[in-house]
Image (spheres, grey):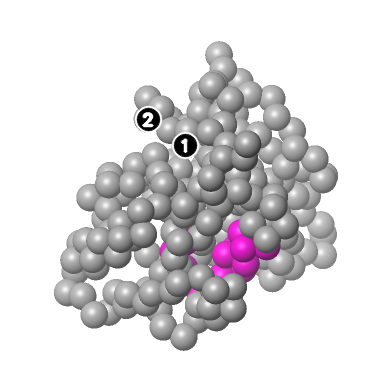
Amino acid sequence: MPSSPLPIVVLISGSGSNLQAIIDAIGTLQLNAEIKAVISNKAGVKGLERAEKAGIPTRVLQHTDFDSREAFDQALAGLIDDFNPRLVILAGFMRILSEDFVTHYMGRMLNIHPSLLPDFTGLNTHQRVLDAGRSQHGVSVHFVTNELDSGPLVIQAVIDINPEDTADSLAERIHQQEHIIYPTSIQWFAEGRLCWKDNQAWLDDKPIRVPPRWQNGQLIYKPDVT
Protein backbone atom coordinates (compact mmCIF):
# COMPACT_ATOMS: atom_id res chain seq x y z
CA MET A 1 0.00 0.00 0.00
CA PRO A 2 1.51 3.37 -0.98
CA SER A 3 2.52 5.67 1.86
CA SER A 4 0.71 8.95 2.41
CA PRO A 5 2.13 11.96 0.54
CA LEU A 6 4.96 13.89 2.17
CA PRO A 7 3.60 17.26 3.38
CA ILE A 8 5.86 20.09 2.25
CA VAL A 9 5.88 23.88 2.28
CA VAL A 10 7.72 25.71 -0.50
CA LEU A 11 9.31 29.14 0.02
CA ILE A 12 9.83 31.37 -3.00
CA SER A 13 10.80 34.91 -3.93
CA GLY A 14 10.35 34.93 -7.70
CA SER A 15 9.30 33.02 -10.79
CA GLY A 16 9.05 29.62 -9.12
CA SER A 17 10.45 27.42 -11.89
CA ASN A 18 11.58 24.82 -9.37
CA LEU A 19 8.18 25.04 -7.73
CA GLN A 20 6.64 24.22 -11.10
CA ALA A 21 8.98 21.25 -11.50
CA ILE A 22 7.82 19.95 -8.11
CA ILE A 23 4.16 20.51 -9.02
CA ASP A 24 4.69 18.65 -12.31
CA ALA A 25 6.50 15.76 -10.62
CA ILE A 26 3.61 15.37 -8.19
CA GLY A 27 1.13 15.49 -11.07
CA THR A 28 2.91 12.69 -12.94
CA LEU A 29 3.21 10.61 -9.75
CA GLN A 30 7.02 10.80 -9.82
CA LEU A 31 6.90 12.54 -6.46
CA ASN A 32 4.74 11.34 -3.58
CA ALA A 33 4.28 14.70 -1.88
CA GLU A 34 1.63 17.31 -1.20
CA ILE A 35 2.44 21.01 -1.25
CA LYS A 36 0.52 22.35 1.73
CA ALA A 37 1.39 25.98 0.97
CA VAL A 38 3.61 28.21 -1.10
CA ILE A 39 4.91 31.22 0.84
CA SER A 40 6.59 34.21 -0.77
CA ASN A 41 8.37 37.17 0.79
CA LYS A 42 7.35 39.22 -2.26
CA ALA A 43 3.87 39.92 -3.60
CA GLY A 44 2.93 39.60 -7.25
CA VAL A 45 5.62 37.13 -8.30
CA LYS A 46 5.00 34.47 -10.91
CA GLY A 47 5.56 31.63 -8.47
CA LEU A 48 2.38 32.63 -6.65
CA GLU A 49 0.46 32.44 -9.94
CA ARG A 50 1.86 28.95 -10.55
CA ALA A 51 0.69 27.82 -7.11
CA GLU A 52 -2.76 29.35 -7.47
CA LYS A 53 -3.20 27.73 -10.89
CA ALA A 54 -2.41 24.37 -9.28
CA GLY A 55 -4.90 24.98 -6.47
CA ILE A 56 -2.23 25.31 -3.79
CA PRO A 57 -2.76 27.70 -0.86
CA THR A 58 -0.51 30.77 -1.02
CA ARG A 59 0.66 33.25 1.54
CA VAL A 60 2.69 36.45 1.25
CA LEU A 61 4.84 37.60 4.16
CA GLN A 62 6.84 40.62 3.08
CA HIS A 63 10.13 40.99 4.90
CA THR A 64 9.96 44.77 4.42
CA ASP A 65 7.10 44.83 6.94
CA PHE A 66 9.44 43.76 9.74
CA ASP A 67 12.05 45.68 11.70
CA SER A 68 14.58 42.86 11.79
CA ARG A 69 15.54 39.60 10.11
CA GLU A 70 14.81 37.76 13.33
CA ALA A 71 11.29 39.20 13.61
CA PHE A 72 10.50 38.23 10.03
CA ASP A 73 11.88 34.73 10.47
CA GLN A 74 9.90 34.23 13.68
CA ALA A 75 6.69 35.18 11.87
CA LEU A 76 7.64 33.02 8.90
CA ALA A 77 8.25 29.99 11.11
CA GLY A 78 4.85 30.46 12.72
CA LEU A 79 3.21 30.62 9.30
CA ILE A 80 5.04 27.52 8.05
CA ASP A 81 4.21 25.53 11.17
CA ASP A 82 0.50 26.24 10.72
CA PHE A 83 0.70 23.84 7.74
CA ASN A 84 2.61 21.09 9.64
CA PRO A 85 5.11 20.19 6.92
CA ARG A 86 7.62 17.42 7.31
CA LEU A 87 9.95 19.17 4.88
CA VAL A 88 10.53 22.83 3.95
CA ILE A 89 11.74 23.52 0.43
CA LEU A 90 13.66 26.68 -0.49
CA ALA A 91 12.99 27.29 -4.18
CA GLY A 92 14.58 30.58 -5.10
CA PHE A 93 13.92 32.04 -1.65
CA MET A 94 16.29 35.00 -1.65
CA ARG A 95 16.73 35.50 2.06
CA ILE A 96 19.62 34.78 4.40
CA LEU A 97 17.98 32.93 7.27
CA SER A 98 18.58 33.61 10.94
CA GLU A 99 20.23 31.05 13.19
CA ASP A 100 17.11 30.33 15.23
CA PHE A 101 15.05 29.72 12.09
CA VAL A 102 17.60 27.31 10.63
CA THR A 103 17.96 25.48 13.93
CA HIS A 104 14.18 25.08 14.17
CA TYR A 105 14.10 23.27 10.79
CA MET A 106 17.46 21.52 10.99
CA GLY A 107 17.29 18.30 9.02
CA ARG A 108 13.88 19.27 7.60
CA MET A 109 14.86 21.98 5.11
CA LEU A 110 16.44 21.65 1.67
CA ASN A 111 17.93 24.27 -0.65
CA ILE A 112 19.14 24.17 -4.24
CA HIS A 113 22.18 26.18 -5.30
CA PRO A 114 23.45 26.73 -8.86
CA SER A 115 27.03 25.53 -8.50
CA LEU A 116 28.99 22.42 -7.67
CA LEU A 117 29.30 23.12 -3.98
CA PRO A 118 31.49 23.73 -2.07
CA ASP A 119 32.70 25.90 -4.98
CA PHE A 120 31.01 29.20 -5.76
CA THR A 121 28.71 29.85 -2.83
CA GLY A 122 26.65 33.03 -3.00
CA LEU A 123 25.37 34.88 -6.05
CA ASN A 124 26.24 35.25 -9.76
CA THR A 125 27.60 31.71 -9.96
CA HIS A 126 27.25 31.30 -13.74
CA GLN A 127 29.43 34.28 -14.59
CA ARG A 128 31.91 33.45 -11.84
CA VAL A 129 32.33 29.92 -13.20
CA LEU A 130 33.03 31.30 -16.67
CA ASP A 131 35.46 33.90 -15.30
CA ALA A 132 37.31 31.11 -13.46
CA GLY A 133 37.77 29.16 -16.69
CA ARG A 134 36.11 26.01 -15.39
CA SER A 135 35.29 23.17 -17.79
CA GLN A 136 32.24 22.02 -15.80
CA HIS A 137 29.39 23.63 -13.94
CA GLY A 138 26.48 22.26 -12.00
CA VAL A 139 23.87 22.50 -9.30
CA SER A 140 23.62 21.10 -5.78
CA VAL A 141 20.82 20.17 -3.40
CA HIS A 142 21.79 20.37 0.26
CA PHE A 143 20.36 20.42 3.73
CA VAL A 144 20.27 23.95 5.14
CA THR A 145 22.60 24.81 8.00
CA ASN A 146 23.72 28.09 9.51
CA GLU A 147 26.66 28.40 7.13
CA LEU A 148 25.51 29.88 3.82
CA ASP A 149 25.29 27.30 1.00
CA SER A 150 27.44 24.92 3.02
CA GLY A 151 25.08 22.30 4.45
CA PRO A 152 25.56 18.58 3.78
CA LEU A 153 25.15 17.72 0.11
CA VAL A 154 22.36 15.43 -1.08
CA ILE A 155 22.75 15.29 -4.87
CA GLN A 156 24.44 17.23 -7.67
CA ALA A 157 24.01 17.54 -11.42
CA VAL A 158 26.96 18.27 -13.70
CA ILE A 159 27.16 19.82 -17.15
CA ASP A 160 30.13 20.47 -19.43
CA ILE A 161 30.76 24.11 -20.29
CA ASN A 162 30.84 24.80 -24.02
CA PRO A 163 33.09 27.46 -25.61
CA GLU A 164 30.05 29.44 -26.71
CA ASP A 165 28.36 29.41 -23.30
CA THR A 166 27.37 32.66 -21.63
CA ALA A 167 26.03 33.25 -18.13
CA ASP A 168 22.52 33.24 -19.58
CA SER A 169 22.94 30.00 -21.51
CA LEU A 170 24.49 28.32 -18.47
CA ALA A 171 21.59 29.51 -16.32
CA GLU A 172 19.11 27.98 -18.76
CA ARG A 173 20.95 24.67 -18.91
CA ILE A 174 21.36 24.55 -15.14
CA HIS A 175 17.65 25.18 -14.66
CA GLN A 176 16.94 22.03 -16.66
CA GLN A 177 19.12 20.03 -14.28
CA GLU A 178 17.55 21.64 -11.22
CA HIS A 179 14.15 20.46 -12.35
CA ILE A 180 15.43 16.87 -12.35
CA ILE A 181 17.38 16.65 -9.12
CA TYR A 182 15.19 18.70 -6.79
CA PRO A 183 12.08 16.49 -7.16
CA THR A 184 14.40 13.46 -6.96
CA SER A 185 15.82 14.52 -3.61
CA ILE A 186 12.37 15.29 -2.22
CA GLN A 187 11.16 11.85 -3.31
CA TRP A 188 14.11 10.24 -1.55
CA PHE A 189 13.04 12.04 1.62
CA ALA A 190 9.42 10.97 1.08
CA GLU A 191 10.52 7.35 0.74
CA GLY A 192 12.62 7.52 3.89
CA ARG A 193 15.79 6.91 1.89
CA LEU A 194 17.13 10.39 2.65
CA CYS A 195 17.37 11.63 6.20
CA TRP A 196 19.33 13.80 8.60
CA LYS A 197 21.28 11.93 11.27
CA ASP A 198 24.29 12.81 13.38
CA ASN A 199 24.39 16.28 11.79
CA GLN A 200 24.84 14.94 8.29
CA ALA A 201 22.87 13.68 5.30
CA TRP A 202 22.24 9.95 4.99
CA LEU A 203 21.02 8.06 1.95
CA ASP A 204 20.05 4.40 2.03
CA ASP A 205 21.33 4.05 5.60
CA LYS A 206 24.78 5.40 4.72
CA PRO A 207 26.26 8.84 5.34
CA ILE A 208 26.70 10.79 2.12
CA ARG A 209 30.42 11.48 1.79
CA VAL A 210 30.37 11.97 -1.98
CA PRO A 211 26.92 12.97 -3.27
CA PRO A 212 25.25 11.09 -6.12
CA ARG A 213 25.54 12.96 -9.42
CA TRP A 214 23.16 13.30 -12.33
CA GLN A 215 25.27 13.50 -15.48
CA ASN A 216 24.64 12.78 -19.16
CA GLY A 217 21.10 11.59 -18.50
CA GLN A 218 21.87 9.13 -15.75
CA LEU A 219 22.33 9.01 -12.01
CA ILE A 220 25.82 8.09 -10.88
CA TYR A 221 25.47 6.71 -7.39
CA LYS A 222 28.73 5.68 -5.79
CA PRO A 223 28.45 6.51 -2.09
CA ASP A 224 31.74 6.81 -0.29
CA VAL A 225 31.23 5.67 3.28
CA THR A 226 34.83 5.44 4.35
The amino acid type found where label 2 is placed reads Asn
Q: Is residue 193 visible?
A: yes
Q: Which residues are magenta?
A: 10-24
Q: Where is mark 1, residue-wise?
A: 152
Mark 2 neighbour density, 10 Å: few (under 14) some (14–19) many (20 or more): few
Residue placed at 46% from the left, 85% from the top?
Answer: 44
Q: How many marks?
A: 2
Question: Residue 117: x, y in percent?
Answer: 55, 44
Separation (CA) of disc 1 from disc 2 = 8 Å
221 part of magenta stretch: no
The quarter of the picture where the C terminus appears is top right
Q: Quadrant of residue 83?
A: bottom left
The quarter of the picture where the N terminus appears is top right
Question: Residue 165: x, y in percent?
Answer: 77, 64
Q: Are marks 1 and 2 in contact (CB under 8 Å)?
A: yes
User: Mark 1: which secondary structure?
Assistant: loop
Question: Residue 105: x, y in percent?
Answer: 33, 47
User: Mark 2: which secondary structure?
Assistant: loop
> Residue most toward the front?
1
Residue placed at 82% from the left, 59% from the top?
Answer: 163
The amino acid type found where label 1 is placed reads Pro
Mark 1 neighbour density, 10 Å: few (under 14) some (14–19) many (20 or more): many
Question: Residue 46: x, y in percent?
Answer: 55, 80
Q: Is residue 174 visible?
A: no
Residue placed at 82% from the left, 45% from the top?
Answer: 217
Rendered image: mark on residue 78? none
Mark positioned earlier in the residue sequence (1 or 2): 1
Seen from the viewer's position, the closer of residues 144 and 161 is 144
Q: Where is mark 2, residue-wise?
A: 199
